[in-house]
Amino acid sequence: MTAAAEKGYTQGEYRRSSEKISRAHIDFARKYNLDGVFIDIDTCLEAGAIGVNVDLPENEPARVIEGLSTDLDICIDAMDKKRLLQNDRIKIALDAVNLISREAKGELLIRGNADQGPFSLAMFAVGMTDFFMNLADEEKHEKTRILIDRALDVHLEFHKLMKEAGADITSLGDSSCGPDLISREMYLEFSYPYHVKLAKSLEEAGIDSVIHICGNLDNILQDVVNTGFPAVEVDHKTDIRRAQKIMSGSNTTLFGPIDPVGSFLNETPEALAGTTREILDLFNGKGIVIGAGCALPPDVREENIRAFSDTVRQYRP
């Protein structure tokens, strides 16, 4: 949102043009001396590709309106990875990654986002309320697991397409399975096994990926680290000191965790620089790719982004 706003693009103009997407992100990264670009058009690409009803407002990111069907068999049948390359919005995202790769490969790290993760994609297909009701109904568990597993196949294919398009690393968001929405017990039963399978499949495909789950991850962070992803992205709600201790005992890199609104948008440049230094000090400058823990709003001030970037560039442990 911030990169598009800098170029004066509406969200509609941005999402409809691979040229505008690539230009917005390359110019933003170069202007602020950033290390890479994060290509995250919106969180509805896969859902739209399998037939979920998606709203595309001109001045806001896309959003799911309603599920595809409450019939699990219909949702399972819809999970066909061939549908990805039949979808114009998927094609635009992949073309944007390819354009960035052709211009800035080696200069900027290219992170191609493959939203949504298997649990969230399955939820979008059914609809949030009905999907969560199914988790509480043992009679629906078998088909729900089949649905999540089929969603994983679609999702894995998107990672592969992002890599082929030129992404150096990929990422996913699976925030519907976070503690803000379900218990740890439900996470371990209906999401953790598929994250483990996804992490292993990506490793076998030679793809390094970052997993993001919104909210306070305190009671599942160790579980998420145990899934095997090379990196975990957390937002500001997670206890960062506890997260550092967990990460220091693993080979997992932390992405984030600066608050996109409370810090990037609302703090003064001096305060944001202080927040940035505190986190870098906590990690001693190692094992972290520092940045916003979730999506930046469009109206973050230039002086704040520069304060963040300059602080990181000048930091010495």
Image (cartoon, grey):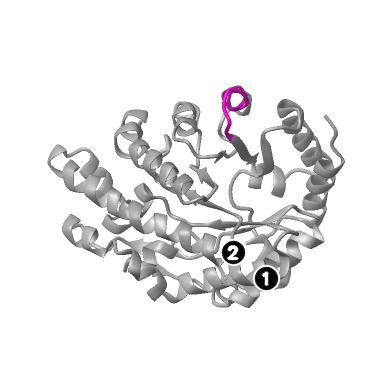
Residue at 37% across, 36% down: 192
Numbered tag placed on residue 166 in the rendering: 2
Q: Nearer the viewer, residue 254 or 3?
A: 254
Establish if 59 lies above or below 117.
below
Numbered tag placed on residue 102 in the rendering: 1
Disc 2 residue crowd, few under 14, some 14–19, many 20+, Cα 10 Å: many
Q: Is residue 251 magenta?
A: yes
Question: Does the rendering let one see residue 221?
Answer: yes
Report the amino acid beneath label 1: Arg
Q: Left or right: 197 with respect to 31? A: left
Kindly report the distance in space between the C-alpha atoms of the residues bearing marks 2 and 1.
Answer: 8 Å
Q: Assign a secondary structure to mark 2.
A: loop
Establish if 299 lies above or below 95.
above
Q: Left or right: 215 with respect to 129? A: right
**Quadrant (top left/top right/bottom left/bottom right) for the C terminus:** top right
- Magenta segment range? 242-252
Question: Does the rendering let one see residue 129?
Answer: no
Query: For the image shown, how many numbered marks are present on the structure?
Result: 2
Residue 289 x/y as whole percent: 67, 41
Upstream in sequence: badge 2 or badge 1: 1
Residue at 66% across, 42% down: 262
Q: Nearer the viewer, residue 74 or 110?
A: 110
Q: Main secondary structure of the magenta part?
A: helix
Q: Would you identify the image quadrant in which residue 220 lies?
A: top left
**Quadrant (top left/top right/bottom left/bottom right) for the N terminus:** bottom right
Q: Nearer the viewer, residue 38 or 229?
A: 229
Residue 115 x/y as whole percent: 46, 56
Residue at 42% across, 42% down: 200
Q: CB of mark 2 within 8 Å of CB of mark 1?
A: yes
Q: Assign a secondary structure to mark 1.
A: helix
